[in-house]
Structure formats: C-alpha cells, structure tokens
Image (tube, helix red, strand yellow):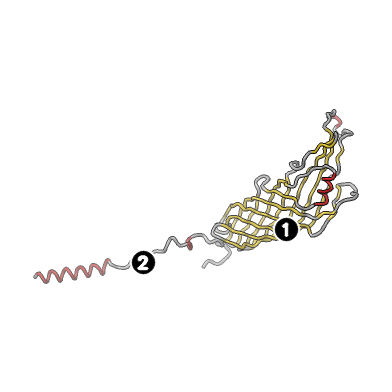
Amino acid sequence: MKKFRLLLLFVFCVANSLTYGQVLPQLPDTTQTDILPKPNRYPLGIGILLGVGPSSFGYVTGYSNMHELLDRQDISRANLVAMYTLGSMIRWKRTSFMLMTSRSVSGLSGDFIPSNERRFRVRQELRFVGFEAGYSLLEKQNRLLSLTAGIGFAGYLLKPEQYSDQATLVDFNALGNRPIDNITVPTLIHESTVGQIGIIWGSQTGKHKASMDVQLRLNYQFGFGKVAWQANNALALNAPFDRVGIFQFSALWAIQQNFDRLKRK
C-alpha cells in the first residue's frame, strides 16, 4: 500500500510538470536600438529655416580695394555685420535643397571718426539670395552633419555721410532744404553673382512626423570675378573693382513637416 501511494505521488508530479512547466516565449530585448525611431524614418520633408531676430552674422573679407579707399579717406567701416536670415527647404533622404535669403540690420553698422570740424560715417548693408544643395555625410540617431554648395546673388551697399557737429536751425516747414554743411554721397553699390559653400550641424529631422530643431550653419560666399562699384543715380568715376568675400554664421530654427513615401517593410 505504501509503494502504491509513492507511485501515485510520482505520477502526479510528472503530470503537473507537463501541464505547468511549458517554456515561455522569449520576450524581445527592449534595450535594442531597433525600437528607437530610425534617422531616415520619414525620407521626405518640407520646411522653413527661420532666424529669430538678427541670428546671423556676416564677416566681410573681400572688397579689399573699396575698403582701402575708405581707409585712405579716414572713413571707418565695420567688418562684422548682424543679419536676418530666412529660407525654405525640401529634403529627400540625405539630400536637401534650400532657397535662402539674408539681409543685414540697417543702421547698426558703421562708425564715426573726427576729421577737422567734420565727421564721416558709412552705413553698410549686405544682401544675399541664393539656391543651395546639401548632402548629409553623417547621420546619427540625434545629429546630422551636412555639406552644402550653391549659387546666388550678393549685394553690398555703402552709404557714406559727411556732417557737422555744430548746432543748426531746423525748420520743420522746410525740411527739404538741407543745410549747406550737410553733404550726402550717393549710395555705393556692388552687386555680383557668387558661389557658396558651407557646412550644417544640427538635430536629426527625419525621425518624426513633424520637427522643430536648431541648425548651426557656416557659409562662405565668393565672387567668380571682380566687379566694378556703382553709384546710385549718379555717374561713377575712378570706381574700384572688387571680388565678393563674406563668411556668414547662422543659428536657425528648422521647422519641418515629414512624409512617409517609402513602402513599409
């Protein structure tokens, strides 16, 4: 009887192990990076590039002949100019195409230098509009590094002014009559077709349906040849010839809407 009970207990243990001892299915490893959004999850993107306020700076390295002419005449100017930048873009996988425009902050550039009883100042303005294409060399999970190249049109405007510190009478009923000691030179203009190369470092924009990230951009604009300066609404004599050379650094918001045009696997 005792042996029968032991045998019955053994059979019960075997049956119980067969019923509840099944192997559970293996759970996926949640530490794998496959569950994270892929950098190129959304291959197509359309967006804008926006600078909040004067978020770009242009550093003038070209125009050496005009700058030497100003220096010889004791007219000061600034090499670093604050700028506004705006652009639109379309991206397909690693390739992007951008239409960019920049313009300097009017009235903030220039300087004052005493010369006898008169002072001289020059107001500077930089303008640029162009098309560029970029290719992403490095695409990490959260960062990208792209090289860009393009072509555009650059304008550099100088407004020299000569005036006196002496107090003068201002008649508000005759504002069109300028004082004799106030001499204004016509705006000097240099316009030229330019090439542009650059580099972009920013956040990955193809992971989500919509994104808003910061891009840091460094561009160099260069002229293909020397172009003569012109005077606005006036004949120009002894005008110098100059080549464009401008470095531009920008911190822009990249606001992008992404679309999935690839077949899901």
**Image position, residue 179 (x, y; %):** 87, 33
Q: CA distance from mark 1 to mark 2?
A: 58 Å
Q: Which is more toward the observer, 166 or 2?
A: 166
SS class, disc 1: strand
Residue at 77% across, 40% down: 111
Q: Quadrant of the N terminus?
A: bottom left
Q: Outermost residue, left direction?
A: 1
Q: In the image, what residue occupies the spot 70% across and 60% down?
A: 149
Q: Earlier in the sequence, mark 1 or mark 2?
A: 2
Q: Which residue is mark 1?
A: 196
User: Is residue 75 toward the left or the right of residue 43 in the image?
Assistant: right
At label 2, the amino acid type is: Pro
Badge 1 crowding class, 10 Å Cα cut-off, few under 14, some 14 to 19, many 20 or more, is many
| Amino acid type assigned to the residue bearing label 1 in the image | Gln
Q: Quadrant of residue 136?
A: bottom right
The answer to whether residue 39 is left or right of residue 56 is: left
